[in-house]
Amino acid sequence: QVQLVESGGGLVQAGGSLRLSCVASGRTFRGYAMGWFRQAPGKERELVGTINWSGGSTYLSDSVKGRFTISRDNTKNTVFLQMNSLKPEDTAVYYCAGGVKSDLSFRASEYDYWGQGTQVTVSS
């Protein structure tokens, strides 16, 4: 059974930092892109960032570029999202996703596996 388990969410003040982790089990995602999405109340799920199979190529949405970093450790089947300079508008449930191809993947339809989500709340 494939599982993606996120951790590291929580409550933080504006300007603070959090590091999200996503550990995959049940299969290796070593050859596949991984992604982080988020969904705020009343809004659609949106892509935060994606990383290709090797970690050599990444993409971050304009809303988080310069503040967030996405990385992965294939030896541990883990993907990370380092979030700095957090803003109240970053408040959302953050989801890790495992892709179906090796290249950067920008659409939810390009991901087959999803974690249960972790709540990130940024207070002003």
Image: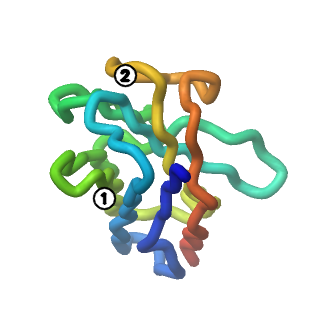
Can you tell which quarter of the image residue 47 is in? Answer: top right
Q: Is residue 88 above or below residue 4?
A: below
Q: Is residue 27 above or below residue 47?
A: below
Alpha carbon separation for disc pair 2 and 1: 18 Å
SS label for mark 2: loop
Q: Are marks 2 and 1 in contact (CB under 8 Å)?
A: no
Q: Residue 18 — which label?
A: none
86 and 97: which one is in front? 97
In percent of width and height, residue 115 lies at 57, 55
* Residue 124 makes an appearance in the image: no
Can you tell which quarter of the image residue 37 is in? Answer: top right
Residue identified by numbered label 1 = 82
* Residue 21 makes an appearance in the image: yes
Q: Residue 104 — which label?
A: 2
Label 2 neighbour load within 10 Å: few <14, some 14-19, many 20+: many
Q: Is residue 124 above or below residue 114?
A: below
Q: Nearer the viewer, mark 2 or mark 1?
A: 2
SS label for mark 1: strand
Can you tell which quarter of the image residue 121 is in? Answer: bottom right
